[in-house]
Image (cartoon, coloured by chain):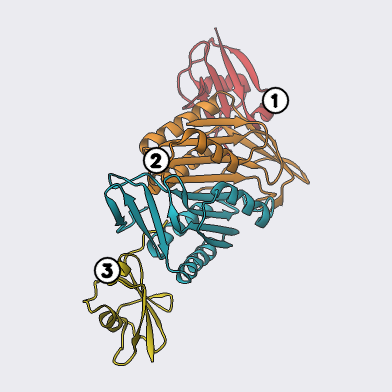
Chain colours: A cyan, B orange, C red, D yellow
Amino acid sequence: MRIEIRENPFDPWQAVADYRSSHLTIGKSGASAVFVGTMRDFNEGDDVQAMVLEHYPGMTEKQLQALVDQSMSAHNLDDALVIHRVGELKPGEDIVLVATFSAHRKAAFDACREIMEALKSTAPFWKKETLASGERWVEKNTAGW
Amino acid sequence: MRIEIRENPFDPWQAVADYRSSHLTIGKSGASAVFVGTMRDFNEGDDVQAMVLEHYPGMTEKQLQALVDQSMSAHNLDDALVIHRVGELKPGEDIVLVATFSAHRKAAFDACREIMEALKSTAPFWKKETLASGERWVEKNTAGW
Amino acid sequence: MSINVRFFASLKERIGSAALEIDAQGITTARDVWTSASGQEADEEMLVAINKEYAALDRTVADGDEVAFFPPVTGG
Amino acid sequence: MSINVRFFASLKERIGSAALEIDAQGITTARDVWTSASGQEADEEMLVAINKEYAALDRTVADGDEVAFFPPVTGG
């Protein structure tokens, strides 16, 4: 399992490919489920020019670790990878990657979505958007189920 | 939208990265959900050495097209990509990629899984496994929900 | 005045043929096609496609149709 | 004999401070920490963490604890 919080842009597809070839046993995990969240240039009807992602160093890692641990054992996953950006982002940059690896697809799908929803509702990250008219904090995440 | 049936190995992560950069508008699709199915070296308690994937040329493409069309409009997706292998495969080779792109994660997650399940239950592909003791047809797909 | 019949996967092996043409004479449904082409009783788990679309075993077929028979699909 | 208080995101801006230390004297719960540090009534939507784990606003705090206050999270 790997959890990474990073300040620079990353290529989520390359990250999954690299992780799979370095951490997974060939022929074991039949199912990989991946979610990538990407910064949009619009939100709630407004154009968004940039975003700053703040987090709570130490607690964020701890919280992500706990929620991935829980999903891994609940779904008997082979492995999982989570990467999340912090700092300044531009539209089109990737914010989050959640990848789950399992023998069967049900577990991979269920766990990927569960981790993503738990991250959205409990991991201490906060988004501040830059609009043409100024800055604003995103107040709440939308529901994902 | 792209649907591809191919006889040679492919890199699903590279395929998603390429498709995203060539087909998607930067800053539009906030959510990418991806499933990759990979050939395992075991099934129903037996070691599997190789596999042949047969399909019904013409009908397979038509069926995939119909099910992706339906999911795209039901979930208002921005785009979708499906790649499926046929022919001879070795353990560790990727069999199927389903990628869905949407403004929001709910639609991307729902559609990715729905397409995958519809593919599993209706797209005319058949697997024949090579075991140490000989060959056998896979008789049924396991349930995915 | 003929029907193009196709078999896939384990059915192809069981029948020993991937494709054959049968006389449309006396044929009304896909079930008739199966019986005429295979000489066997229809297996209710079997899937049927007429002109590359899923159809019921008792669907009417027409001269020139392509009628395919195959076991439950196992892709993905 | 002190509590380390931290504020994040919009709360940090509202309070005008990211971190401060308050005297633990007379402090029993996280709610007391908030009132003492902010001089404001607690907002029930606010989230609380004690030593980097989520806690209820009325959870007891101890000398040396790190008590953080922040708005609903919006990552992912």
Horizontal and vertical percent for residue A28?
Answer: 66, 53
Residue B139, can we see it? no
Q: Residues within 10 Å of mark 3 (few under 14, many from 20)?
A: few
Horizontal and vertical percent for residue A105?
Answer: 54, 50
- Residues under labels 1 and 3: Cα distance? 78 Å
The residue depicted at 34 percent of the width and 53 percent of the height is A129
Q: Name the residue under label 3.
A: D14
Placement of B60 over or under A107, stated as above or below: above
Q: Name the residue under label 2.
A: B28
Placement of B102 over or under D30, stated as above or below: above
- Residues under labels 2 and 1: Cα distance? 52 Å
Residue mark closest to the camera, 1 vs 3: 3
Residue B60, can we see it? yes
Q: Mark 1 points at which residue?
A: C16
The residue depicted at 48 percent of the width and 17 percent of the height is C61
What SS does tag 2 mark? loop
Horizontal and vertical percent for residue C25?
Answer: 54, 9
- Residues under labels 2 and 3: Cα distance? 32 Å
Chain that bears disc 1: C
